[in-house]
Image (tube, rainbow, N blue to C red):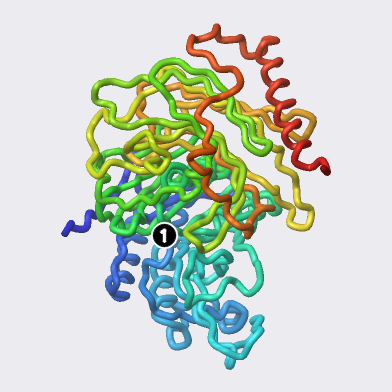
């Protein structure tokens, strides 16, 4: 059994202790997120929370974020439309509120810091005021609660997209979690599986024009596209937001991963531990995402052993149209249902390389552990423990150094449908994420890749996703898209092995071609060819017989 590792990440040159709070005129604020080991005892958790709030505040944190469902299973009323309207500070009214609200309110007030927690909320519709109650019964919700510096409860958000959680009810109305601070930043916030859906993850940013999002989570990581920090960083990049992600830590079930991310600049600080861990992470966050100055901790990559961290495999991998890569140079196109992917790959393997690699394209519907289904479009390369498709998205039981390959060249040119705004939701119908995964179960640093996007005729986007660091080993690298119009449909069945085509009909070469100048006619012609191919495939889908 591992001992709990209690860390404190403090960089005095960045966030040295003082009583200075961030103000609306400052160009940044100080945030803290907690990676918190799951414990069952509510009193232990409350005492730990109070201590961690103080530790973060001692580093001048303006806001502290805790993970999903790490306080315990206690049922806590959060009467935001009733008692909290008249008595918003539980610390000053301990007789009318649950101990959880009272103690966290007290800690927020004593440390003059905003605090976001997640808990199991109970609402008794036989005895409640100001709430929507479709039935006269007791409801349980997965809920975020926000406290301001005075200890007042200022916002409550109920999870909309439950991941199983069969004893709980999804939010009865799709209300978004939004609150404004005294340092001039308005935050949106949502919970775990919500990240995969248009409402709230896309809507909350685009409808409210927000730049700062809080994410409480108990994520169950899945290779090769949806490990925790991988998708956290990808969301911050794609939505161009500051993203404060606080993750529950329980490596035995695959829960781990937290960080603070700033738009396209990537991780200001992040961690993906392979052992039981509690950790406070603090960073100064620019109010304009991506405009990072100074030195930041960045990814904390000091845990080389992730063998005990359980990772699932994407169940849609057998449904990908894929091709097994070979050592050396290859240049080819794969396509499926309107998605066209060109791969330029120079795969470098050594005598120590254990993994095989596939290039894949997918345009269909996947299941999320049979809890829900969702549309996906992607172009990617991913590691496999063997040559067969059913070995992909998996690791060997024990990590061995240099067991993954490197790439002297890796570029993916993806032709994908342009996202369109759903006016009733004020949110895009598709979102595309640049994903990648290293053996540390962390994504590439922002300076290790380049992504260029061009829109053709307002209907097709051309993505050029290129690896810049040729010395890094990879489990995956690709563009992962969520297509919300296909949510709820039957998952795409696996490709029957006898029908699987391992050869590619177009642009197959085994020798490197001269690299075109980015604005040259060669690049423009290639873009047009890919666009025409994609449009042709789309038209073939929608033209009546």
Report the residue that reaches farthest toward the front.
Answer: 498
In terms of depth relative to the viewer, which is nearer, 531 or 472?
Answer: 531
Image coords of residue 534 (percent x, y)? 70, 31
- Taking the image as shown, residue 493 lies to the left or right of residue 314, namely right
Residue 290 visible in the current orientation: no
Q: Is residue 188 left or right of residue 220?
A: right
Q: Residue at x 57, y 28 (%)?
A: 451
Residue appearing at x 45%, y 32% in the figure: 358
Q: Is residue 81 visible?
A: yes
Q: Residue at the spot x=46%, y=83% of the render?
A: 97
Instruction: Please state which of residues 22 and 526 is positioned toward the viewer in this rendering.
Output: 526
Farthest right residue in view:
544
The C terminus lies in which quarter of the figure? top right
Q: Is residue 325 above or below residue 235?
A: above
- Residue 347, picture quadrant: top left
Q: Percent position (x, y) of residue 166?
A: 48, 74
The image shows residue 126, relative to residue 291, as above or below, that is: below
Which one is nearer the viewer's eye here, 250 or 67? 250
- Mark 1 sits on what residue? 218
Element under disc 1: loop
Q: Residues within 10 Å of mark 1 (few under 14, many from 20)?
A: many
Is 91 placed above or below 493 here? below
Q: Residue 210 placed where, x, y %?
A: 64, 50
């Amino acid at each position: 059994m591992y001992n709990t590792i209690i860390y404190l990440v403090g960089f005095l040159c960045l966030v040295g202790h003082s009583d200075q709070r961030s103000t609306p005129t400052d160009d940044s604020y100080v945030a803290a997120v907690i990676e918190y080991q799951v414990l069952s005892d509510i009193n232990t958790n409350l005492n730990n929370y109070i201590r961690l709030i103080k530790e973060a505040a001692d580093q001048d944190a303006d806001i502290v974020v805790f993970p999903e469902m790490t306080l315990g299973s206690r049922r806590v009323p959060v009467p935001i439309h009733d008692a909290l309207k008249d008595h918003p500070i539980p610390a000053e009214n301990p007789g009318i509120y649950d101990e959880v609200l009272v103690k966290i309110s007290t800690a927020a007030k004593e440390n003059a810091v905003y605090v976001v927690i997640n808990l199991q909320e109970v609402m008794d519709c036989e005895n409640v005021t100001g709430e929507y109650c479709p039935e006269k019964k007791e409801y349980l919700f997965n809920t975020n609660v926000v406290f301001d510096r005075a200890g007042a409860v200022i916002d409550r958000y109920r999870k909309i997209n439950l991941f199983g959680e069969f004893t709980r009810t999804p939010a009865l109305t799709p209300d978004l979690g939004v609150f404004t601070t005294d340092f001039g930043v308005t935050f949106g916030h949502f919970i775990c599986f919500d990240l995969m859906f248009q409402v709230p993850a896309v809507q909350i940013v685009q409808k409210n024009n927000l730049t700062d999002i809080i994410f409480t989570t108990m994520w169950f990581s899945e290779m090769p596209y949806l490990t925790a920090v991988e998708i956290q960083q990808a969301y911050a990049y794609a939505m161009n937001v500051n993203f404060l992600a606080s993750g529950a830590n329980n490596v035995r079930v695959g829960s781990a991963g937290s960080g603070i991310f700033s738009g396209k600049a990537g991780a200001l600080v992040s961690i993906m531990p392979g052992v039981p861990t509690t950790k406070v992470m603090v960073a100064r966050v620019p109010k304009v995402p991506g405009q990072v100055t100074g030195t930041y901790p960045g990814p904390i990559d000091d845990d080389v052993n992730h063998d005990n961290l359980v990772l699932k495999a994407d169940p849609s991998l057998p449904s990908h149209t894929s091709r097994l890569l070979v050592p050396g140079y290859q240049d080819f196109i794969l396509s499926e249902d309107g998605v066209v992917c060109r791969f330029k790959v120079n795969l470098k393997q050594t005598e120590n390389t254990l993994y095989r690699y596939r290039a894949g394209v997918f345009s269909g519907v996947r299941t999320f552990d049979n809890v829900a289904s969702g549309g996906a479009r992607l172009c990617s390369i991913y590691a496999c423990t063997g040559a067969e498709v059913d070995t992909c998205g998996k690791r060997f039981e024990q990590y061995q150094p240099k067991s993954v390959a490197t790439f002297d060249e890796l570029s993916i040119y993806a032709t994908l449908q342009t996202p369109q705004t759903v006016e009733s939701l004020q949110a895009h119908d598709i979102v595309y994420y640049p994903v990648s995964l290293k053996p540390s179960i962390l994504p590439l640093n922002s300076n290790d890749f380049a992504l260029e996007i061009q829109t053709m005729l307002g209907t097709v986007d051309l993505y050029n996703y290129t690896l810049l660091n040729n010395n890094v080993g990879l489990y995956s690298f690709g563009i992962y898209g969520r297509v919300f119009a296909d949510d709820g449909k039957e998952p795409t069945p696996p490709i029957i092995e006898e029908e699987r085509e391992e050869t590619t009909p177009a642009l197959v070469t085994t020798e490197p071609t001269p690299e075109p100048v980015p604005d040259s006619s060669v690049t423009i012609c290639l873009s047009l060819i890919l666009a025409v191919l994609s449009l042709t495939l789309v038209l073939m889908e929608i033209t009546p017989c």
